[in-house]
Image: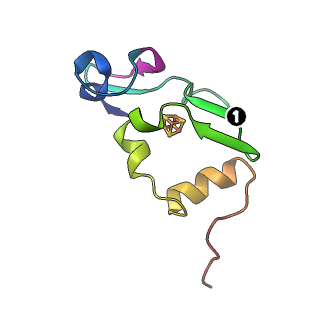
Amino acid sequence: MDFSGHELQAAGGSVPDGLAVEVTASTWRMRGTDHSPPRCAALTGKVGERAACGIYEWRPNPCRELEPASDACERARARHGLSPLAPRML
Ligand code: SF4
């Protein structure tokens, strides 16, 4: 997910500049999130076992807005072969 360059430390924000890559003149994304398979450069640990955001307090807004068990969260979990957090109502 892309975020505004205003969120970078160089622009007075909190996201460490070296962990982000420029996408357009005004938008950036976390380094590694567009790799295949994707892995954010700020992620520590092993997905599915024990993982954490290494810049949790300084993460960009799209990361702050992603709610646990939201559709986007569940899709991301599924891509990594993880079970859903929330039981599905059928
Ligand atoms: S929450 Fe942290 S590890 Fe996850 S994508 Fe955002 S910056 Fe990267």
Image quadrant in which the N terminus is located: top left
Q: Quadrant of residue 61?
A: top left
Asked whether residue 56 is drawn in magenta, I would say: no
68 to 51, vertically: above or below:
below
Image quadrant in which the C terminus is located: bottom right
- The picture places residue 34, in percent across and down from the top left corner, at 54, 29
The stretch of residues the image draws in magenta is 18-24
62 to 6, vertically: above or below:
below
13 to 83, vertically: above or below:
above
* Front position in the image: 49 or 88: 49
Q: What residue sits right under mark 1 in the picture?
A: 45
1 to 11, vertically: above or below:
below
Q: Residues within 10 Å of mark 1 (few under 14, many from 20)?
A: few
Q: Quadrant of residue 2?
A: top left
Q: Quadrant of residue 33?
A: top right
- Residue at the image point whose x is 39% and y is 33% from the top: 58
The reply to whether the residue tagged 1 has its Cβ within 8 angstroms of ligand 1 is: no
Instruction: Please state if 52 lies on the left or on the right of 7 as rendered.
Output: right
- Which residue of the protein is positioned furthest toward the bottom in this rendering? 90
- Which residue of the protein is positioned furthest toward the front in this rendering? 57
- The picture places residue 56, in percent across and down from the top left corner, at 47, 38
* Front position in the image: 90 or 60: 60
Instruction: Please state if 1 lies on the left or on the right of 5 as rendered.
Output: right
- Residue at the image point whose x is 52% and y is 62% from the top: 71
Q: How many marks can you see?
A: 1
